[in-house]
Image (spheres, rainbow, N blue to C red):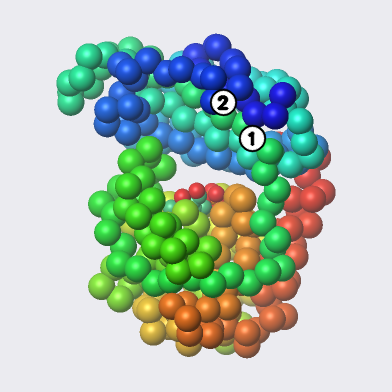
């Protein structure tokens, strides 16, 4: 099969799957999601993404319809049914179903999984970006289905021929529309702290570990747009990008002053992905 959809136990090609109108994901975006890259039928770092999904469910009072182990096994069974060496696996749990009413529905959530062929980004290609106001609300640490501000800023980037929108709140850099962003300055890795303004990215956490393992100083602190623009390198991280350098922000050339440290971080993350043998 070229793509696969799953909804509460039913499977089929993604564009033939149907979801009931009563699903609260449809009215309210009332649910949480996660996503992983999958290579040679190994969903990369699946357990860390499942952990985040379940802790997000806990934070919002959503009851997943199965345990973590069962979800892991279900995803692994489904990826076998889709063709291709590299795939993208998306999974979400909505709060459940009911006639439209803002107050919570009781009972278990609905599980939706989508798998499609998708290659990892070319990690060696630096990207063009735009800078945008972070117009999201204050639960950015939870990976909810409410993504309208991210959709709008991502579209603004696309319309400028760029791959990402770097977001800031009153001059303080938070993250990107669908990635985290960090900078290198004088040999240190500087990255926004995990608070309610950024998603604690799995790739960001690995970037930090790899930096520490390689003796690179790591500073989790707020940094400004000014620091971003004068950084030695800007690094964008996510599961489908791993770690990629940035070559421009709003058409202005940036980075390019610490290719060595960038390559240590980028190449180690990439090699770990290529060598993954299990979750
Ligand atoms: N920040 C946002 C807003 C995201 O949507 C994503 C990924 O979807 C990330 C960061 C990166 O997270 P991860 O590295 O876990 O894929």
Quarter of the image containing the C terminus? top right
Q: Secondary structure at mark 1?
A: strand
The numbered dot on residue 154 is: none
Q: Is mark 2 within 8 Å of ligand 1?
A: no
Circles 1 and 2, Cβ within 8 Å, touching? The answer is yes
* Quarter of the rendering containing residue 266: bottom right
Q: What residue did someone put label 1 on?
A: 116
Which of 232 and 191 lies nearest the eye of the viewer?
A: 232
Image height of 29 relative to 108, above or below: below
| Residue 265 in the image: above or below residue 30 | below
Q: Position of residue 6 (x, y in %)?
A: 56, 20
Left or right: 79 in relation to 136? right
Which residue is nearer to you in this view: 100 or 217? 100
Q: Indicate the position of residue 71 as horizontal and vertical percent values.
A: 58, 22
Which numbered disc, 1 or 2, marks the residue that appears first in the sequence?
Answer: 2
Q: Which label sits on residue 14?
A: 2
Q: Position of residue 28 (x, y in %)?
A: 27, 31
Position of 36 with respect to 28 (left or right) is right
Other residues around mark 2 within 10 Å, as few (<14) / some (14–19) / many (≥20): some
Q: Residue at x 79, y 50 (%)?
A: 274
Give the image location of residue 129, x and y in percent.
49, 70
State how many labels appear: 2
| Residue under the point 52% across and 31% down | 91
């Amino acid at each position: 099969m070229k793509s696969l959809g799953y909804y509460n136990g039913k499977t089929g090609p993604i564009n033939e799957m149907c979801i009931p109108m009563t699903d609260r994901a449809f009215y309210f975006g009332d649910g949480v999601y996660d996503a992983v890259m999958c290579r040679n039928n190994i969903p990369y770092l699946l357990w860390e993404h499942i952990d985040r999904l379940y802790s997000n469910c806990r934070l919002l009072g959503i009851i997943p319809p199965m345990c973590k182990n069962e979800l892991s096994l279900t995803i692994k069974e489904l990826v076998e049914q889709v063709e291709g060496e590299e795939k993208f696996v998306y999974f979400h749990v909505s709060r459940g179903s009911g006639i439209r009413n803002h107050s919570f529905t009781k009972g278990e959530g609905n599980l939706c999984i989508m798998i499609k062929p998708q290659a990892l980004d070319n990690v060696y290609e630096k990207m063009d970006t735009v800078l945008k106001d972070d117009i999201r609300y204050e639960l950015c640490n939870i990976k909810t289905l409410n993504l309208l501000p991210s959709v709008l800023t991502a579209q603004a980037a696309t319309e400028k021929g760029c791959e990402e929108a770097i977001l800031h709140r009153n001059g303080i850099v938070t993250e990107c529309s669908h990635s985290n962003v960090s900078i290198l300055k004088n040999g240190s890795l500087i990255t926004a702290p995990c608070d309610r303004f950024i998603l604690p990215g799995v790739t960001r956490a690995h970037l930090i570990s790899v930096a520490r393992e390689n003796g690179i100083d790591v500073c989790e602190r707020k940094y400004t747009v000014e620091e971003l623009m004068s950084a030695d390198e800007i690094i964008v991280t996510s599961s489908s990008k791993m770690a990629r350098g940035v070559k421009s922000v709003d058409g202005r050339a940036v980075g390019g002053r610490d290719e060595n440290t960038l390559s240590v971080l980028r190449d180690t993350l990439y090699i770990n992905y290529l060598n993954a043998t299990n979750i």
